Image (cartoon, rainbow, N blue to C red):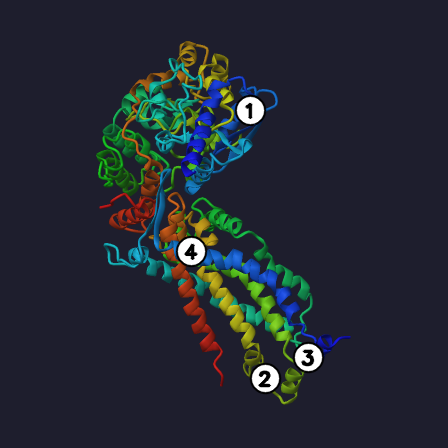
């Protein structure tokens, strides 16, 4: 063994390079499929770039022109993109709040050694089921169910609750309600399973100790489960919110892309899609994407900060 | 060096363009790609066209909802020059509402140069629709689509006291009469039409100006405004339903227990949209008849267009010739498929044949009625924007008729939609 080799051996073996090598594929994929498109989207948002018929217009650099257009109030004084951002948040909250509450409750029931519910596997499978259906198929189903000549209206009329069919798609409340209900049904199973995993990760000794000390279920929940579950809960809320802000398929298919009534169920991504379909307006849809990105970033930070406060 | 490459490229291009004409006997592509938005023409093609040996026909079918068909077709056409021979679009279908977008572009080619020359039997408006601003014909339609007023005989008897087409026509020959009969129908417990947009085509086809003026300002034609005024009345008085023209809510009205007297549609409508009426159990086949109605108009129609750069030019020409000039095929389209063909001679034969009648229409000779109507059809005031503007206006106003918004808001929403789809159109 020569001197050089000896010296290297003395330094110890570094395994770090293997670590980097193993995470390389992820970073490559991330760079090519996520980072590069993101940068391109931002770049595109500064250009006028669309098609009229088969004629391509642009790309012409317009600076912040697309953003200015998006934030210019229309004749009635509404800044449309803010209206759609509001719609998106409302639709998400209407679905997400019950989703997380019920998922939390179910997760506690399923993991409680006191209740010891039988047939857990069965229930877990059943509540996860709606997630397996394609969102668009699920929306088509609801559209047919609740149409003026659909089964729900037939029942309502057969039971004598109303003589004329109820036009579920003519009211803001019912359309938003249906969208939230579908999102709730599709995602509460998934959240339940995530939260169960979180609760099962908590040391069982703590629950037993609390039990011995005479803590009630409510006390156990607020003093032990919730604080220790917080990291998972924050993760669940933030991922749900990112998904929620990108809400598209359910309202798009349910309202046939119209966001009816009066565009009150039009989400940000549906708005973006309006610009893409037909005119391939990459400039405007790029600008909307960037705005969605910024909104998502800010809201995630807010949620993270408020829920992760150190005592 | 650059110049050399450029001139070489031009030479190659010129050669490529001239090649099909220069070497007509050269073997053509093995794959014939057809773009369409539904299966209708595919059915006729498979039954009545004999594909040359060794050629595979590949159908690319994309539904037209939300403009998805045009998006897919546009992407393919824009990529046409770079596509491999077997992937090139060899023929595509287009509808009246957006045919202009393709006809008035370099993505389609002169079919007369390919050998489709005889339009003597084709209806004039079908050729006009496929002719570009310079007078070059770029496609043919395999059907002619004068749109008739289709009425339920039993309801007409109850409301008008007759189901005879001539007498019904006399009672519904203009919009004033039509509106008056709507009130009578309502009094007897019927709907005049089953969709707020049912009468859109009869009005919009007779527009006196295009959707946009020379400066690209959106303009509302008096005919469109007349349609809006009529629909307003019809909804308020309960003469029609708030369903769209394609909705289930309208279609259930075609069952025997339906309460609607009038529908509007061309020959393709019977098989394509009136499935409920033809239902053996719940339908009412035979209880129908047609007449011209209050306004001459056409609806839809499928044109076969010739894309530039196809590698199967002679087969393309052959398909086109078959569907407009082959008497045998055109006869079968009428006799077996309830089509109104785009061949005047064939149609005239059926119109004059006393033994011909449609069982669905209670024995009425529909070809005779349609033949008379073709004289009044005009092709005018079309733009490349027609489809999305017609659709957008109907969608926005539907919310008004359903009671969700007032008329002003509905129109504002329509303008928003136009701004999103066509940045260059100036809205009020």
User: What residue sits 44% from the left and 63% below the top?
Assistant: A92
The residue at 43%/73% (across/down) is A302
Do we see residue B291 in this rendering?
no
Tell us which disc is closer to us: 3 or 1.
3
Residue B46 bears which disc, if any? 1
**Badge 4 or badge 2: first in the primary sequence:** 4
Position of residue A91 relative to residue A278, above or below, is below
Q: Does mark 1 fall on the same chain as mark 2?
A: no
Q: Residue at x 44, y 28 (%)?
A: B11
Residues at marks 3 and 1, CA–CA distance in whole angstroms: 77 Å
Q: Nearer the viewer, residue B212 or A3?
A: A3
Please identify the quarter of the rendering in which residue B393 is found.
top left
| Residue B21 location (% of width, % of height) | 46, 19
Q: Nearer the viewer, mark 4 or mark 2?
A: 4
The reply to whether callout 3 and callout 1 are in contact (CB within 8 Å) is: no
- Marks 4 and 2 sit apart, C-alpha to C-alpha, by 53 Å
Q: Earlier in the sequence, mark 3 or mark 2?
A: 3
Mark 2 highlights which residue?
A: A216
Mark 3 lies on a secondary structure that is helix
The image quadrant that residue A65 belongs to is bottom left
Q: Which residue is mark 3?
A: A11
Which residue is tagged 4? A41
Dots 3 and 1 on the same chain: no
The crowd level at tag 4 (other Cα within 10 Å; few <14, some 14-19, many 20+) is some
Where residue B254 sits: x, y (%)?
A: 43, 33
């Amino acid at each position: 063994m020569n001197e050089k080799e000896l010296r290297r051996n003395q330094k110890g073996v570094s395994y770090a390079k293997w670590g980097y090598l193993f995470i390389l594929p992820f970073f490559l994929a991330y760079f090519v499929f996520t980072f590069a498109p993101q940068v391109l989207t931002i770049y595109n948002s500064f250009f006028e770039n669309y098609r009229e018929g088969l004629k391509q217009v642009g790309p012409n650099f317009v600076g912040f022109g697309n953003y200015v257009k998006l934030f210019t109030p229309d004749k009635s004084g509404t800044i449309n993109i803010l209206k759609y951002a509001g719609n998106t948040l409302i639709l998400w909250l209407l679905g997400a709040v019950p989703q997380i509450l019920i998922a939390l409750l179910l997760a506690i029931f399923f993991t409680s050694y006191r209740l010891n519910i039988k047939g857990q596997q069965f229930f877990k499978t059943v509540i996860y089921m709606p997630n397996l259906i394609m969102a668009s198929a699920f929306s088509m189903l609801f559209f047919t169910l609740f149409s003026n000549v659909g089964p729900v209206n037939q029942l309502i009329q057969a039971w004598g609750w109303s003589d004329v069919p109820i036009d579920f798609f003519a009211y803001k409340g019912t359309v938003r309600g249906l969208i939230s209900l579908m999102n709730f049904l599709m995602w509460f199973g998934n959240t339940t399973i995530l939260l169960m995993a979180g609760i099962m990760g908590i040391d069982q000794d703590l629950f037993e100790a609390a039990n011995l000390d005479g803590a009630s279920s409510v006390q156990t929940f607020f003093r032990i489960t919730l604080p220790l579950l917080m990291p998972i809960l924050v993760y669940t809320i933030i991922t749900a919110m990112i998904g929620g802000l990108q809400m598209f398929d359910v309202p798009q298919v349910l309202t046939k892309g119209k966001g009816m009534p009066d565009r009150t169920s039009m989400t940000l991504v549906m708005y973006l899609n309006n610009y893409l379909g037909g005119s391939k307006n990459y400039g405007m849809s790029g600008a909307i994407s960037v705005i969605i990105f910024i909104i998502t970033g800010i809201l995630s930070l807010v949620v993270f900060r408020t829920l992760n406060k150190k005592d | 060096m650059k110049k050399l490459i450029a001139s070489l490229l031009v030479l190659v291009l010129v050669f490529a363009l001239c090649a099909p004409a220069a070497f007509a006997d050269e073997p053509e592509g093995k794959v014939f790609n057809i773009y369409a938005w539904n299966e209708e023409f595919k059915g006729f093609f498979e039954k009545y066209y004999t594909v040359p040996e060794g050629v595979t026909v590949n159908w690319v079918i994309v539904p037209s909802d939300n403009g998805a068909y045009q998006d897919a077709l546009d992407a393919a056409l824009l990529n046409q020059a770079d596509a491999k021979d077997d992937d090139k679009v060899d023929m595509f279908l287009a509808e009246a509402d957006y045919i202009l977008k393709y006809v008035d572009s370099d993505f389609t080619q002169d079919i007369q140069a390919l050998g489709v020359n005889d339009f003597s039997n084709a209806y004039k408006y079908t050729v006009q629709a496929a002719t570009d601003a310079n007078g070059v014909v770029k496609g043919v339609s395999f059907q002619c689509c004068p749109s008739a007023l289709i009425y339920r005989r039993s309801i007409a008897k109850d409301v008008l006291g007759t189901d005879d087409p001539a007498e019904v026509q006399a009672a519904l020959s203009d919009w004033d009469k039509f509106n008056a009969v709507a009130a009578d129908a309502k009094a007897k417990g019927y709907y005049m039409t089953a969709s707020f947009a049912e009468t859109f085509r009869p009005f919009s086809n007779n527009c006196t100006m295009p959707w946009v003026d020379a400066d690209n300002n959106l303009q509302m034609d008096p005919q469109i405004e007349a349609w809006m005024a009529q629909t307003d009345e019809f909804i308020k008085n309960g003469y029609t339903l708030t369903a769209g023209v394609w909705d289930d809510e309208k279609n259930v009205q075609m069952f025997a227990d339906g309460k609607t007297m009038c529908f509007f549609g061309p020959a393709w409508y019977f098989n394509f949209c009136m499935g409920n009426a033809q239902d053996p159990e719940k339908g009412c086949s035979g209880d129908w008849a047609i007449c011209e109605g209050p306004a001459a108009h056409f609806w839809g129609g499928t044109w076969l267009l010739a894309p530039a750069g196809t590698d199967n030019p002679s087969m393309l020409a052959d398909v086109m010739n078959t569907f407009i000039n082959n008497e045998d095929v055109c006869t079968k389209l009428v006799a077996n498929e309830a089509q109104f063909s785009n061949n005047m001679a064939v149609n005239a034969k059926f119109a004059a044949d006393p033994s011909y009648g449609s069982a669905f229409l209670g024995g009425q000779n529909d070809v005779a009625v349609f033949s008379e109507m073709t004289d009044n059809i005009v092709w005018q005031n079309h733009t490349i924007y027609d489809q999305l503007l017609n659709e957008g206006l109907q969608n926005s106003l539907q919310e008004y008729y359903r009671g969700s918004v007032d008329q002003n808001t509905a129109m504002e929403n329509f303008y928003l939609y136009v701004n999103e789809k066509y940045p260059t159109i100036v809205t009020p």
